[in-house]
Image (tube, rainbow, N blue to C red):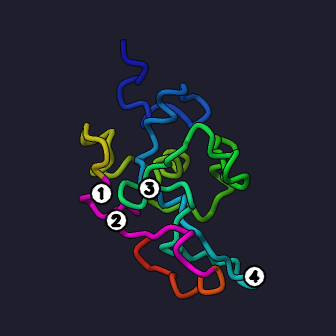
Amino acid sequence: MSLLRPQFWKHYSLAQLNAAEWEALCDGCGLCCLVKLEDEDSGQVVYTKVACQLLDTKTAQCSNYANRKQFVPDCLQLTPELVPQLNWLPKTCGYKRVQLGLDLPDWHPLMTGKAQSDIPAKKSAAGRCISEHDIDPDDIEEYVVRWVR
């Protein structure tokens, strides 16, 4: 028996999703795991291609999802209450789209029925990011990218 209700993202708020639906709503793009920089004056947020130490840069999957907070204490656990506060979530994010009452993009795994369908659609960090271990933190501004919106 599937724990996913038909087209649940169209009919329920984030707070009404069960655990399986919540996890399925994530497209696995890894964009939320990229280092972001915020302008102190304007509040504008830009993404870098520098990924969290736990992100597999080839697949954009967390290498230790269950225990990530032990290794990356400032890793955010997305919740229905937190999503509206995060202005930096990309507009392609399933959580953000449901929160805003928008449908999922046609490349989303829930639409295609295929895991990682975000990669060929170029909506993923997979193959486009580098680990934070591979850079000098003082050079972070050199890694700002424009492919995340």
Q: Position of residue 42 (x, y in %)?
A: 70, 83
Q: Considering only order in the chain, which callout, 4 or 3, is on the residue closer to the N terminus?
A: 4
| Neighbourhood count class around disc 1 (C-alpha, 10 Å): few under 14, some 14–19, many 20 upward | many
Q: Give the residue type that dot 4 points to.
A: Glu
CA distance separating discs 3 and 4: 30 Å
- Marks 4 and 1 sit apart, C-alpha to C-alpha, by 32 Å
Q: Which residue is mark 2?
A: 127
Q: Position of residue 97 (x, y in %)?
A: 48, 51
Residue 86 x/y as whole percent: 65, 58
Asked if residue 83 lies left or right of residue 115, the reply is right
SS of the residue at dot 1? loop
Query: Which tag is nearer the camera, tag 3 or tag 4?
Result: 3
Question: CA–CA distance between discs 2 and 4?
Answer: 30 Å
Residue under the point 50% across and 56% down: 55
Q: Which mark is first along the chain, 3 or 1? A: 3
Image quarter of the N terminus: top left
Q: Which badge, 1 or 2, comes first in the chain's sequence? A: 1
Tag 2 and tag 4, C-beta contact below 8 Å: no
The picture quadrant where one finds residue 6 is top left
Question: What residue did someone put label 1 on?
Answer: 119
